[in-house]
Image (cartoon, helix red, strand yellow):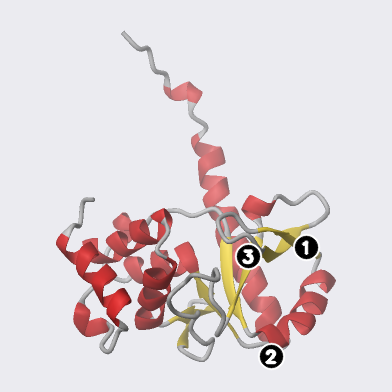
Amino acid sequence: MVSFSLKSVSWQRMSEAVDNVRRRLLHAASCLDNAGIPYAVVGGNAVAAWVSRVDDTAVRNTRDVDILLRRADLPRAIAVMEQAGYRHRQVASLGSGGTMDVFLEGDDGKVRDAVHVLFAGERIRPDAPAPNEDVADSEDVDGFRLISLAALIRMKLAAWRDKDRMHLRDLQAVGLLEKSAVPGLPDLLEERLDFILEHPED
């Protein structure tokens, strides 16, 4: 029989981790907003923001912050973020064979906890069937620019990693993943959407 004690779980630390992600997201967004640099929040935080509009109890926490930028704006973003205490680095991008731009919180920041940069109009990896969306397809919400639901779905369908399928199912679980939300998909992305809709638990 396995003995389990609540003392083995630090609920305070778990709560602090969630708060730190939110703080990091809002701080990075504020830096870019104040500098007039177009961006959009994407990834797990974008999924959480959309899911919370329907059912905040269904929100899945995420550790990193994903920001969509135009590549031409990266030099300005680096200057602004480093002035705010972040450190820009290029690190290996798992699964793509390339590199990923990140902003670490200070000299001791960890990549997993960093602000990760995705580039508008570029593919997340060479074999992705569609490029990332543009930052303009977004809206102001609660202190940051949020990628539109349709653009988020298209990006998740194009990326199609395990976590992307998980995020798509999170959207599906609260009724946000529907074919009517993303009309005119390329054939492959439509096939992937059909798969998720037909196999919600796979």
Q: Please report the residue visible at 32 percent of the width from the left and 83 percent of the height from the top.
A: 186
Residue 98 falls left or right of residue 154: right
Q: What element carries label 1?
A: strand
Asked whether 9 or 134 is in front, the reply is 134
Kindly check if marks 1 and 2 are in contact, taking CB atoms under 8 A apart as contact.
no
Asked whether 97 or 66 is in front, the reply is 97
Residue 134 falls left or right of residue 170: right
- In the picture of the structure, the residue carrying the numbered disc 2 is 36
Q: What element carries label 2?
A: loop
On-image quarter of the N terminus: top left
At label 3, counting other C-alpha atoms closer than 10 Å, the crowd grade (few under 14, some 14-19, many 20 or more) is many
At label 1, counting other C-alpha atoms closer than 10 Å, the crowd grade (few under 14, some 14-19, many 20 or more) is some
| Label whose residue precedes the other's in the sequence (3 or 2) | 2
Q: Please report the residue visible at 56 percent of the width from the left and 48 percent of the height from the top.
A: 17
How far separated are the C-alphas under marks 3 and 2? 19 Å
133 vs 65: above or below: below
- In the picture of the structure, the residue carrying the numbered disc 3 is 116
Task: Name the amino acid, label 1.
Answer: Arg
Can the viewer see residue 125?
yes
Q: Position of residue 151 (x, y in %)?
A: 40, 81
| Label whose residue precedes the other's in the sequence (1 or 2) | 2
Q: Position of residue 42 (x, y in %)?
A: 50, 72
Residue 83 falls left or right of residue 152: right
Q: Position of residue 145 (x, y in %)?
A: 52, 81
Q: Is mark 3 on a helix, strand or loop?
A: strand
Task: Please identify the quarter of the rendering in which residue 75 is found.
Answer: bottom right
How far separated are the C-alphas under marks 1 and 3? 10 Å
92 vs 194: above or below: above
- In the picture of the structure, the residue carrying the numbered disc 1 is 89
